[in-house]
Amino acid sequence: MENRIQELRRLNKMKLDELAKKLNVNIRTIQRYETGERIPSPEKLILLSEIFNCSIDYIYKRTDFLGDFQKNSSINVDSTTKTIFLDRVRLLMIQKEITKEYLSKKTNIDNNDISKYITGDEFPSIENLKKIVMELGTSIDYLVGINDDYIINEIQDKWIEIKIGNKVQKIPIQKIKDFLN
């Protein structure tokens, strides 16, 4: 990620203090982002992608395709990230007993779009990703596989044990199968 933020800032003819003001951080923080001493929070990454009109994958150097990124368009992510996202969203929905309809209603995202997201047909826009993260009570980092705060401890014959922070949650395998069907 280092130098990519600097590259984008320079490409957009933006000074350090201008970017700092837009992100509501000090100039030293921007310098640390640019040298790799510090990694922007998920919220700051979203802002950076909106400011520079690029994907988070581009900022992370997962792709060299700058492309024409639109805030409300789908994000292009690699298959590994998409698989991690699908697995983790489904798991959290099961754990929290949230249906597609409920998630749609609480996030004001069309039910058909929610269906596309949890079947892997489409990846959510930045705006919709933020809404999903807020409703599921997690982070973008977790949903896209940057960190593993939510960890599956072990699979048994009848249930899966999930560690969420310091809390352990057991989910019946049949419940997972019913949800996926």
Image (cartoon, rainbow, N blue to C red):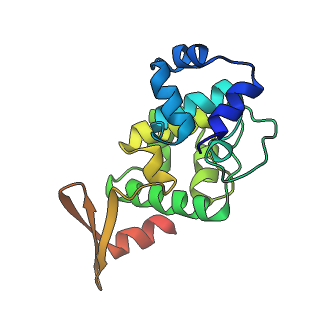
Q: Is residue 6 left or right of residue 159?
A: right
Q: Quadrant of residue 176?
A: bottom left
Q: Nearer the viewer, residue 74 or 48?
A: 48
Q: Residue furthest right?
A: 67
Quadrant, the N terminus: top right
Residue 9 location in percent, x, y? 68, 26
Of 22 and 75, which appears nearest the observer?
22
Left or right relative to 74: residue 179: left
The residue at 70%/42% (across/down) is 74
- Seen from this angle, which residue lies furthest bottom? 157
Taking the image as drawn, is residue 113 in sight? yes
Would you say residue 107 is visible in this rendering? no
State whether residue 3 is above or below residue 8.
below
Give me the residue at 41% from left, 44% from top: 139
Task: Residue at 64%, 49% (x, y): give it.
Answer: 123
- Seen at 63% across and 59% down, the residue is 120
